[in-house]
Amino acid sequence: MPLLRSRWLVAHVVALIAVIAFVMLGFWQLRRLDERRTFNHAVSVALEAEPIPIAGAPAEGYVRVTVAGTFDTSVETLTLRSFEGTSGYHVLTPLVLGDGTGVLVDRGWVPISYDTPPVGGPAAAPTGEVLVTGILWPAEHQAIPETLPGTLRAIAPEVVGAFTPYPMRDSYLVLQTADPAPSELPIPPAPPELSDGPHLGYAVQWFLFAGVVIVGYPILLRRVARTKKIW
C-alpha cells in the first residue's frame, strides 16, 4: 500500500509540473509575440518616415536617416546572407562622415563569388562623397578578434571599429538608396518580414497541451481507480 500511494503521489506531481510547464511556455510565446509586434511597429514607422540627418538620430531604435560621407574600403568586410535562396554575402563598408566619425553601412547582397573584400567590379563602393539614405539598425555582436576577418558572423560595428582610427557609431545603417546609385550590385537589403511569426500558434499549442493534461489526467485516474491499479 505505501508503494501504491508513492506512485499516486509521483503521478500527481508529474501531471502538475506538466501543466505548469505548458502554461508557462504558452505565456512565454505570448511575450515573444508582443515583442515581435513591438518590433514590427518600430520598423514600419521607420520605413514610412521621412529621413532625418544622422546627427539628430537617437542612439537606439530604428530610425530612417540620411548621411553624407566617403566609404572606407580598407576595412570593408562581409557577412554570410542568402538572397532568394541563393548563397552570398552582405557587404559591410564604413562610411566616414564629415565630423570624423564613421557608421557601418550594409550596402547589400552580392553572390558567393564575391568572397574577398574589398569587393570589386560592379559591386565596388563608389569613390568620393556619397549620400546614403537608410535605416539605423541595432548592432549585432561578436567577440573582437586580434585581426579583422574578411567575413564576420554578425553585423558588428564594434568589431570593425576596433580596426579604424575613427570612432564608429554603435548602430549600423541598412542602405535603401545612395547617390550615386549602385549599379546592379550590391542588391540593397530587402525590408524585414513584418509578420507575427509562429508565436501565437505555438502559444495555443502549449495551452492545448495543458488542457489535455487537465482533462485527461482525471479521466485516467477514474479508469485506474476502477481497476485498482496504477499501471
Image (spheres, rainbow, N blue to C red):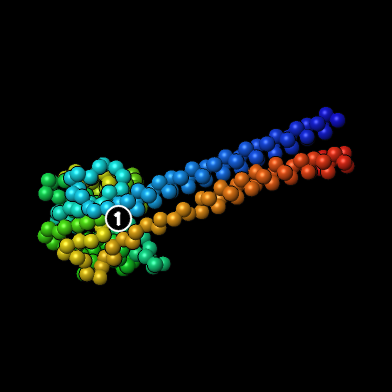
Residue lying at 23% horizontally and 61% vertically, measured from the top left: 177
Res. 168 image quadrant: top left
Question: Quick check: 131 above or below 41?
Answer: below
How many numbered callouts? 1
| Mark 1 secondary-structure assignment | helix
Give the amino acid at mark 1.
Answer: Glu
Q: Could you tell me which quadrant the C terminus lies in?
A: top right
Quarter of the figure with the N terminus: top right
Decide: few, some or many residues near mark 1? Use Cα within 10 Å; few <14, some 14-19, many ≥20. Answer: few
User: Which residue is located at x 88 percent, y 42 percent?
Assistant: 227
Q: Please indicate whether residue 68 sits to the left or right of residue 23 in the image.
A: left
Residue 80 in the image, given as x and y percentages of width and height = 35, 59
- Is 36 situated left or right of 166 in this image? right
The residue to which callout 1 is attached is: 48
Q: Residue at x 40, y 58 (%)?
A: 193
Residue 29 position in % (x across, y down): 52, 45
Going 25% across and 49% down the picture, which residue do you hit? 160
From this viewpoint, which residue is outermost toward the top? Answer: 2
Where on the picture, by quarter, is residue 99?
top left
Q: Is residue 146 visible?
A: no
Q: Position of residue 121 (x, y in %)?
A: 21, 69
117 to 43, vertically: above or below: below
Q: Is residue 7 visible?
A: yes
Residue 94 image point, x, y percent: 21, 53
Nearest the camera: 74 or 220? 220
**Which of these two is toward me, 80 or 59?**
59
